[in-house]
Amino acid sequence: MLHILKLDLGGIPQSWVNAEEATKHYAEGSISWTLGKPIAVMRGGISRNTGKQSLIELHSIFATKGAARINLFEVIPAITKSKLYRRDQGFCAYCAHHVSELDSEAEHIIPASRGGSYSWMNLVISCRACNQKKGNRTPERAGMSLMYAPYIPSLYEDMILKGRHILADQMEFLTANLPKNSRLIQKIAVSKNHDSPLSDPLRS
Ligand SMILES: [Zn+2]
């Protein structure tokens, strides 16, 4: 399935949309500009004058005419297990082993029973063994230390985390807006240089 990056007028990412949703924007005339090469052609309505069917070229990135009413930079991206897995690149925060998404667990650093929240700063990816070993304890109590620190993804990082089959020009647009110290940039550089299965989470 095609995933097209939808931006607002100012170029701020809004969401990933499918071909049908993108076509709707083209048909309504609510697109202000596009980036990237056309990636698909959709059939539109039949013109009364010419009797010919119109064709709509979909680009990998488009901007709508509207500007977002809320400041998306102030919004904390919603957390999901799948995005958490990609943020932590599939590595257990305690033993640093790589785990498959299926075998990974979203681990509360401060246990939920002790008031720890289901949030970006209190969750890390863990293997089952470490999660069980830690149990209902804080890392200090369990004598287990974190191999990396959790963080809240930026808006652009979040778009990468929730994207599927991100195209090269979409990735270029999003990474151009990441802070230089973004761990996702380092990740992307690694996956470009080494075609190892470990560098796959962002491309799955
Ligand atoms: Zn582990």
Image (cartoon, helix red, strand yellow):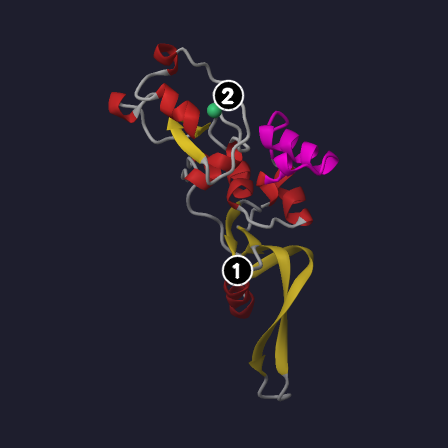
Looking at the picture, which amino acid does disc 1 mark? Asn
Task: Tell whether 181 sits left or right of 119.
Answer: right
Q: Which one is in front, 172 or 110?
A: 110
Q: Any magenta on residue 186?
A: yes
Extreme right residue here? Answer: 193
Task: Tell whether 113 sits left or right of 186.
Answer: left
Which residue occupies 54% across, 70% down?
Answer: 27
Q: Which one is in front, 108 or 58?
A: 108
Badge 1 element? loop
Which residue occupies 40% across, 32% down?
Answer: 106
Residue wearing tag 1: 18
Q: Can see residue 154?
A: no
Magenta span main SS: helix
Image quadrant occupied by the N terminus: bottom right
Specify the label residue 173 is tagged with.
none
Q: Any magenta on residue 143?
A: no
Badge 2 element? loop
Residue wearing tag 2: 95
Which residue occupies 59% across, 84% down?
Answer: 47
Q: Is mark 2 within 8 Å of ligand 1?
A: yes
Which residues, given as a range, are shown in magenta?
178-200
Task: Residue 50 in the image: state x and y as whole percent.
Answer: 64, 88
Q: Is the residue marked by circle 2 packed among few (<14), some (14-19), or many (20+) residues within 10 Å?
A: some
Task: Residue 131 in the image: state x and y as whole percent.
Answer: 39, 25
Task: Residue 80 in the image: state x and y as whole percent.
Answer: 41, 40
Task: Residue 172 in the image: state x and y as whole percent.
Answer: 67, 43
Q: Is mark 1 within 8 Å of ligand 1?
A: no
Q: Which one is in front, 204 or 7?
A: 204
Asked if residue 27 is positioned above or below residue 100 in the image, the reply reads below
Task: Tell whether 169 sits left or right of 2.
Answer: right
